[in-house]
Image (tube, rainbow, N blue to C red):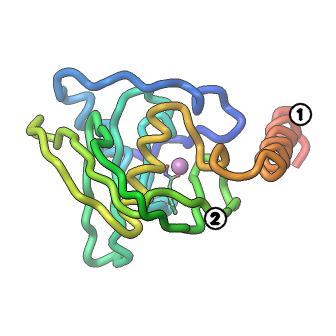
């Protein structure tokens, strides 16, 4: 198991549409292990494979807030089948946009079909933070970031800030 480096805004990899997983190979299982290690280390409640530079439709989530009662969940090729009309607002963050948080409105409940690590097809009805997290992660698989759901003014501001940070780091400043 290893912690993999996170892909950070404005890296264009974050705009890729990830490809479906075919067979669940040893490489896919290793990717999932490393995603959990990377996610718990960060720490975060969810991670999409593209955030570690792998453009595959793989998501890890653990919304349990308890280090001793971990509840890791893997979603391979997840698809949203149904969303509620009711919406909820959560303050979202993203490991690819460190230390930036903003409120996002999304459907309160979603039905998601996915494959688990044994390749079995499953469905889950999610609400609360799991519903929000699943939508945030499935957006990543489609090259969409939570800042795409906020105002253009706020989005342009945060993209500019991260673009400058990347430029300064490349130049060896800060
Ligand atoms: O750790 C994370 N927290 C979070 C909080 C509110 C809504 C979504 C998230 S997901 C985020 C980790 C991440 O970037 N996943 O892609
Ligand atoms: Ni994210």
Residue drawn at the location 67% of the way across and 62% of the way down: 102
Q: Nearer the viewer, residue 163 or 27?
A: 163
Q: Secondary structure at mark 1?
A: helix
Neighbour class for label 1 at 10 Å: few (<14), some, many (≥20)? few
Calculate the distance from the C-alpha at mark 2 to the C-alpha at mark 1.
33 Å
Residue drawn at the location 35% of the way across and 60% of the way down: 109
* Residue 169 in picture, x, y percent from top left: 82, 40
Position above or below: 131 against 164:
below
Q: Secondary structure at mark 2?
A: strand
Q: Are marks 2 and 1 in contact (CB under 8 Å)?
A: no
Point out the frontmost of discs 2 and 1.
2
Q: Nearer the viewer, residue 146 or 47?
A: 146
In the rendered image, the quadrant that contains the N terminus is: top left
* Residue 172 falls in image quadrant: top right
So how many labels did they put on this image? 2
* Residue 139 in picture, x, y percent from top left: 48, 41
User: To which residue does mark 2 refer?
Assistant: 103
* Residue 14 in picture, x, y percent from top left: 58, 33
Residue drawn at the location 33% of the way across and 54% of the way down: 110
* Residue 159 in picture, x, y percent from top left: 78, 42
Position above or below: 35 against 29:
below
129 to the left or right of 24 = right
2 or 1: tag closer to the N-terminus: 2
User: To which residue does mark 1 refer?
Assistant: 171
């Amino acid at each position: 198991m290893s912690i993999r480096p996170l892909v950070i805004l404005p890296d264009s990899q974050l705009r890729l549409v990830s490809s479906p997983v075919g067979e669940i190979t040893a490489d896919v299982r290793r990717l999932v292990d490393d995603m959990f290690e990377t996610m718990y280390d960060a720490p975060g409640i969810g991670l999409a494979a593209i955030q570690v530079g792998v453009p595959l439709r793989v998501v890890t989530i653990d919304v349990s807030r308890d280090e001793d009662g971990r509840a890791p969940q893997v979603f391979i090729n997840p698809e949203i089948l149904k969303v509620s009309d009711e919406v909820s607002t959560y303050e979202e963050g993203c490991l690819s946009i460190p230390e930036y948080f903003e409120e996002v409105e999304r459907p309160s409940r979603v039905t998601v079909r996915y494959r688990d690590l044994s390749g079995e097809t499953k469905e889950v009805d999610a609400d609360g933070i799991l519903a929000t997290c699943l939508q945030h992660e499935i957006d990543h698989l489609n090259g969409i970031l939570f800042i795409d759901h906020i105002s253009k003014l706020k989005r342009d501001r945060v993209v500019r800030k991260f673009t400058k940070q990347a430029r300064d780091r490349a130049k060896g400043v800060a």
